Each structure stands twice: as structure tokens, then as C-alpha cells.
Amino acid sequence: MKESGRNDNMFMERTINAIGQGAFYTEQFCNGIKVVYDCGSTTSLKLLQKAIDSRFEDDSKIDLVFISHFHSDHINGLPYLLQKCKVDKMVVPYLKQNEIIIHLFELIIYCLKNNINSEEEMLLARIIESAGDNRRDRINIDGAPQIIPVVEEYSEQEINIDDIPSKISSGCSIIINFYQWRYVPYNYRQSFYYPLLEGEIIKALGKMPSSYDEIKCIMEDKRTKYKIINVYKNVFGKKYLNESSMVIFSGARGEDYRICKMRGMDIKMWRGLVKSGCLYTGDINISDGIRWGWLKKNYKSIWDSIQFMQVPHHGSTKNFFKDIAKENFEFFLCAGKKNTYGHPDFGVIKEILFNGKELSIVSEDSKTEITYYIMN
């Protein structure tokens, strides 16, 4: 949102950026507050950087960055974002120490495969390490953001955006007082694959490493490196790997607004006032009634404020429950045109459309990008 072009009636712009296989969602309020949910793409880092450039001026302040989980297609744009902008706070899912080590191995394997430079790798590693209990002085850059882990324990505490503590609970509301807009995170943790990977790593190495620096030393040995890479290849073929993800509700509870949707040359204007809430789901697994019920229960007080929902995990059928499509939401998802995962799954698309709901698929094509203009 450019200050020079701001409309006095404009409240906020919410953009589903066209970056292919990944996620980069931005919200910019008319008073200058800026919020990001996820920042990654495995389709093209250059495309993601171009999207970042189109959304933010150099050295502009970003008040909040939410990270759903630590897979590369959700975080590999963070080094560029942190270089370009001044991020005040970064809210991440809390990780136990063994989980940090597992994600650090995954990060290093990704960086080796994609020729990511050591400075960017180290920065991402420090962010992952900061998701645990030992967070002090992890990110060694000028103007480093405050890293705020979200734990599983539930709380309905309301927190001002300027006074967020060093660790927060799932279910708390981060409030922008000027608008009574709220961001409500839930760290949805399903740790089935963590013990499996931990066991395989210990089997391969004889012990579990304790830090990024130790892992780097281990991976210098070629034989050991390929042994670890094979461990991850084998486990990443399992269906339950994308179990955990931090979900975010963004919206004003009980408040309705005029909303205009723009996509390429297409414009949609809702008649009258509509709900403002959006549920960003990352790669959460809600593939059955129990998990779907859990999500609805934990967002019970604001469920009626949701108008838009991100289809989980780029439209994967392994993360989707059929009753999702029965909700009176407008759905969207991001997926690369030529991704190797089969995203989005045709069964997911069919379920949503056959229930009479609207689904927008955003790819790397700029014409598929969506901006919602939310107005007073």
C-alpha cells in the first residue's frame, strides 16, 4: 500500500501474492501497520523477491511476521525480507530442542541442494534455533526482530501489538488497538514424525546433535552427509510429514466492512457489509473430523467472523477434510504450475466447487494474484 495512493476510506489491503509453490500473504493497514504470514517459494526465489519489492519500500517497517512452520517453501524468503525491511517482531511455532535439530538438518539439506549461500543458511538456522527456549542473541544482524514462540497451551489473553511478551500462548489475541483488529495464533502440533526422525538420526550418528554448529561439522563428512540425506528422503515419503503448522486468524471480531476483490482485470464487490476474517492455515493437517472439530472448537468465539480461508497445504488431499467445503467461506490456495506434488488435488477442488463455494488458485502467474480491499 503506497502512502501516495492511499484512499481515505481504505482500511486495509490483504494480498495473496503470486509466488507459485509457497506462501507469502501480506496485510497493510492505512495507518502504516504491516503484517506478513509466511515468506517462501520453491518455484522461484527471484519471483518471491520481486513480490517483496512490490509490497514494501526499502527500510520500511514490518510490524509482525508470522511463520506457520519451518519448511523451505514457507521461510526461504526471510533473509531477503530481513535485508530489505525492518521487521519488528516475528511470531513462530515453539519447538522443543530435538525438533530444532530435526529442522536444522532439513534446512542444511535444502541449502546444499539449492546452493543457498552460507550467510542466508545461518540466518535461517538462527531463526529456527530461536523458536526454542534458548533464544538469546541468536540472530546477529542489525535491527534483528524479536522472536516470539507460540506454545500449545491455551489462553484467551489480549495483548497489544506493541507489548507482546517473549513467549505467548495459542488462542491469545494480538490486538491493533486503533482498529480493534486481532491476530489469533494456534500452534497446532502433531509430532508423529519427530520421534521417527530422531530415532533414525540417532541410529545413523550414534547420538542426537545439540546445535547448528555441531550439525555443520557432522555434515562435512561426505559419508555421514549422504547417510543423513537418505534418512530424510525415506521419512519425507511418509504421509504424515506435514502434521504441524501454526494457524492464524486475522480479522475484526463482530465488525463488518465493505470488501472489494481484485484479480487481474476481474473485480468483485460484495453487496452490503461482510465479514473481514481470514484463516491462514499453513500446512495444517485437518484430514478428519476430529482435527477439524478441534480447529472449530478453538476458534469458536471468532468462527462467525471468518469470510476467507486458505486451503491447507496447497490443496493436498492428505490435509483436507470434506466438511471444510461446507463452510460458508471463500477459499484460496497457492501452488506452483509445475510442482511435483500434484497440488492442488483434483478431489479437493471438486469438493469445494461441488458444494457451491468459490475457490481461487494463485500460482506464479501475476494475473492470478488476489488483493482484497477492506474499506470502512
Image (cartoon, rainbow, N blue to C red):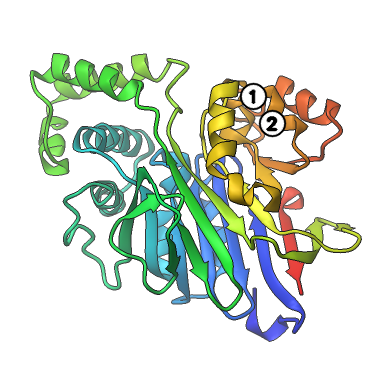
Q: Which residue is drawn at the image coordinates 66% and 28% (left, top)?
A: 344
**Which percent across, then down, holds residue 31?**
59, 81
- Secondary structure of the residue carrying tag 1 is loop
- As displayed, is residue 25 above or below residue 363? below
Q: In this rendering, does residue 54 appear at all?
A: no
- Secondary structure of the residue carrying tag 2 is helix
- As displayed, is residue 223 above or below residue 272? above
Q: How far apart are marks 1 and 2 (CA)?
A: 6 Å
Is the residue marked by circle 2 packed among few (<14), some (14-19), or many (20+) residues within 10 Å? Answer: many
Residue lying at the far right of the rendered structure? 271
User: In the picture, residue 162 is in which quadrant?
Assistant: bottom left
Q: Which amino acid does label 2 sit on?
A: Ile
**Which percent across, then down, holds residue 324?**
69, 31
Query: Disc 1 vs disc 2: Cβ atoms closer than 8 Å?
Result: yes
**Which percent across, then down, holds residue 6?**
71, 81
Q: In this rendering, does residue 26 appear at all?
A: yes
Q: Quadrant of the C terminus?
A: bottom right
Relative horizontal placement of residue 57, taking residue 154 as reference (left or right)? right
Q: Which amino acid does label 1 sit on?
A: Phe
Find residue 321 and name its label.
1
Q: Which residue is drawn at the image coordinates 11% and 20% (left, top)?
A: 205
Q: How many labels does the image show?
A: 2
Q: Which residue is drawn at the image coordinates 43% and 16% (left, top)?
A: 237
What residue would you read off at disc 2?
324
Relative horizontal placement of residue 6, taking residue 76 as reference (left or right)? right
